[in-house]
Amino acid sequence: MNQRRSLLLGLAILCASTATQAANLILDLGNGITVPYLISTAREISIAPGTGNITLRLVQGSGAAGDGWCGEGDAPPPSILSFIVSPGAITVGQSVTATWSTKNVTSCSTTASVLAGTVSNWPATVGTSSTGLNMVLPTAGTYAFRLQCSGPGGVSPTVTSTVTVTTTPPPTECPGVNPPPGTTRMVSFTNTSALRADGNTEWPAGTVLAADNYSPVWGPVFPTRTGTGAIPLLNGQYAAMAFNTGTSSGSSTPWGGSNFGGLLWTQAQQNGGGTAMVAISECPGDFSQRLPDPVKCVTTGNSGQMNFILGTTGSRCPLVLNKTYYYNIGFFDLNGNQTCGANNLCHFFAAPN
């Protein structure tokens, strides 16, 4: 085969090297390197009689992008090289770290994520890579973090990294302390609308709130107060909302120079009825066994008030500084008998005072 024929054949073969069907001609470049040429990618093939030159006219766009001889071809597909959110199992309020890397990507979306609670710094769109994005997960449940990226070559498959969040475990000083029989702890709830009369504080409808901590139901942190909160409790559920008394007393407290506070509740405007039980204890779900004072630290009623005092005794539930306690709240008696009645749902409508 003469030089011209070899050059034509070589160019034809190189320009078609990105095709995906079975090869009909192969260019041997030596050193074990071969380049297949697929005759099916040519729209015209001719052999000149006499010289034996083979002419192949390529289908437009079948070449390698940027080779200087052929069309631009297809852009490489985008891909997510790695994506992980770890650790895969934590307790409420702990944080996880997300890392990811991509290739041939210009933007990434997280909108397919399905999360048990709101994660403030997991936006709808994120960068094309991250060496460590820290996120606090506020609610118990399953968090399916999902990432999908796009680029000139299209859209990548969605990649999922899952984290399981469980309720904060009871303090180690509370072994054997159990809630009333037949009851379970509620760790989060979704707020609905029109629970009470105009003028009362209301979260936006659909807001998911943690029910195992003072924050954010009644304030950013204890004892800051933002207003009322209605906590929906089904028959058989209780809420154990942790708060810490802090290290300051006296004039440093938000009660105007006093060292006491409390929780005031009344019957909700909707799904009312039922007698609430409220107890302050060092243990979640404890309504009787580890109360600081068995008489002063538990009370019941359709409306009522649970007051505490820091560092001294008196008519209020006596607490000490720099210690974690729980507001334990439910609609049942000490034997676990439900008080919500036929409604099966009562709202604990309360505010710190």
Image (cartoon, helix red, strand yellow):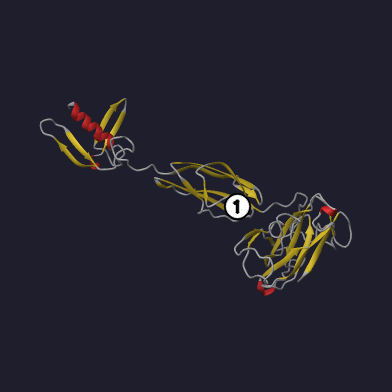
Q: Which of the image's four quarters has the C terminus? A: bottom right
The relative height of residue 90 versus residue 25 in the rendered view (above or below) is below
Taking the spot 80% from the left edge, 61% from the top edge, the residue there is: 262
The relative height of residue 171 versus residue 12 in the rendered view (above or below) is below
Image position of 194 (left or right of 106)? right
Image quadrant in which you'd find residue 37: top left
Position in image of residue 111 (x %, y %): 51, 54
Three-letter amino acid code of the residue under disc 1? Ser
- Residue lying at the far left in this picture: please name it: 50
Position in image of residue 224 (x %, y %): 74, 57
The relative height of residue 123 versus residue 334 in the rendered view (above or below) is above
**In the rendered picture of this protein, how many numbered marks are placed on residues?**
1
Position in image of residue 217 (x %, y %): 69, 60
Position in image of residue 235 (x %, y %): 68, 68
Taking the spot 61% from the left edge, 61% from the top edge, the residue there is: 207
Is residue 186 visible in the rendered structure shown here? yes
Is residue 180 visible in the rendered structure shown here? no
Q: Nearer the viewer, residue 198 or 223?
A: 198
**Crowding near pointer 1: few (<14 within 10 Å), some, many (20+)?**
few
- What residue does disc 1 label? 120
Q: Which of the image's four quarters has the N terminus? A: top left
Taking the spot 19% from the left edge, 26% from the top edge, the residue there is: 3
Disc 1 is placed on an element classified as loop
Q: Nearer the viewer, residue 337 or 313?
A: 313
- Residue lying at the far top in this picture: please name it: 31
